[in-house]
Image (cartoon, rainbow, N blue to C red):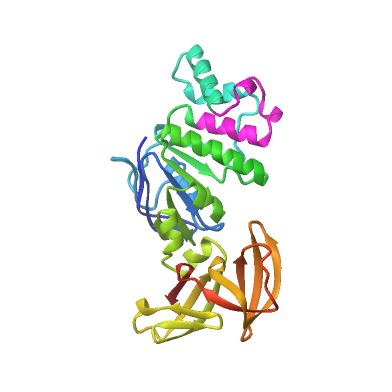
Amino acid sequence: MSAVCLSSVARAYDGARALDDVSLTAPNGHVLALLGPSGSGKSTILRLIAGLEPVDSGEIHFGDALVSSRSHTMPAEARRVGFVFQDYALFPHLNAAANVAFGLDKRQRAERELEALRWLDRVGLKHRAHSFPHELSGGEQQRVALARALAPRPHALLLDEPFSGLDPVLRAELREITLGTLAETRTTTLFVTHDAEEALLVADRLAILKGGRLLQEAGPRDAYDHPNSHDVAAALGPVNVFKASVENGAVHTPFGAVRAEHLGGAASARAVVRAEALLLRPGTQARLLDVRPSGAHDLARIEAQGVIWRALIPPRSALADTVDVEIHPSGAFAFSA
């Protein structure tokens, strides 16, 4: 396996930049999650790494090997990159074993068949070796696609929202199977998703993109606890935002102060507070508008001075119509406006 490194990569379509000076690294044997909304450049990065398109500028390296630059594009078939698409792209006329064996064409037939069965066994589908794609569930097709991509032992594996069409329970199950297989094989992986929770769960490193630009690359915990912008904080979970002047090194919101000493002499700032950083207790500071179940938490809406914020609180909290609000500093950030 090899680390995959992008250095100042740009790519445009019809004059519009899909990627703008992006530099990031998928470490050798680890998972780099690419998080961002549609149009942020995630899938473009995968296509450039796979060699399906050239870069307009910048370079892509696999380890020490240059695979893409403005003057050089290594052919896709020479890159040894595995690719799992959203729709899995299995060959409908081949059974599961033949699909997995397809990328092992340089081996003898008996060896190909044996290796395909080994990989199907690894993903728990050896018993479905002779089934065709239309006979497999969506989750089974995903596992066949993963085995097919990993069987040739690629330099890197590219996963383009591989679980997006699955129900939540199956999605979680297959995510665990996939992560276990990737850890066992120590495969360098780029994992594209627009789901923040999924990105935080799968990533050893996390790259957050918007509008073709890289906003931040960091470990998932570091990115969550130390976002470098409002956009990064919002990409990783629900936040409340309040614009105000900076007074005595803080932004004073209707629900409490957010420290802003690091902004120096900035006249105004944007306070960004994670929903789970709002701690509610009986009091009179704010009105409790409503409370609704939200998975492991309840989602409460509170109002003060005409401003409405959302808070994720412990379920079934006993609260009256008015509450006092404390902002936990670990989930509160101030950025220059």
In the displayed orientation, state which residue is furthest to the left.
Answer: 64
Image position of 72 (left or right of 128):
left
Q: Quadrant of residue 304 in the image?
A: bottom right
Above or below, 229 against 19 in this view is below
Residue 326 placed where, x, y %? Answer: 53, 75
Rendered location of residue 71, percent (x, y): 32, 46
> What residue appears at the point 60 percent right and 69 percent down from the top-left corner?
311
Reply above or below: 308 against 295.
Answer: below
Q: Total marks drawn? A: 0
Instruction: Tell which of 39 and 72 is nearer to you.
Output: 39
Q: In this view, does 130 lie to the left or right of 217?
A: right
Q: Say if residue 162 shows up in the picture.
A: yes
- Residue at image location 60% in from the left, 35% down from the top: 142
The image position of residue 81, as x and y in percent, is: 44, 36
Q: In which quarter of the image is the C terminus?
A: bottom left
Residue 100 position (above or below residue 299): above
Name the residue rendered at 41%, 64% in the picture. Answer: 226
| 257 to 11, vertically: above or below | below
The foreground one among 223 and 23 is: 223
Instruction: Say left or right for 302 vs 179.
Output: right
Name the residue located 50 percent from the left edge and 39 percent from the top edge.
179
Residue 215 inside the magenta-drawn segment: no
Q: From which residue to which does the magenta span run?
A: 123-149
- Quadrant (top left, top right, bottom left, bottom right) of the N terminus: top left
Judge whether residue 144 is colored magenta.
Answer: yes
Please state the horizontal and vertical placement of residue 167, each as a whole percent of the image.
68, 45
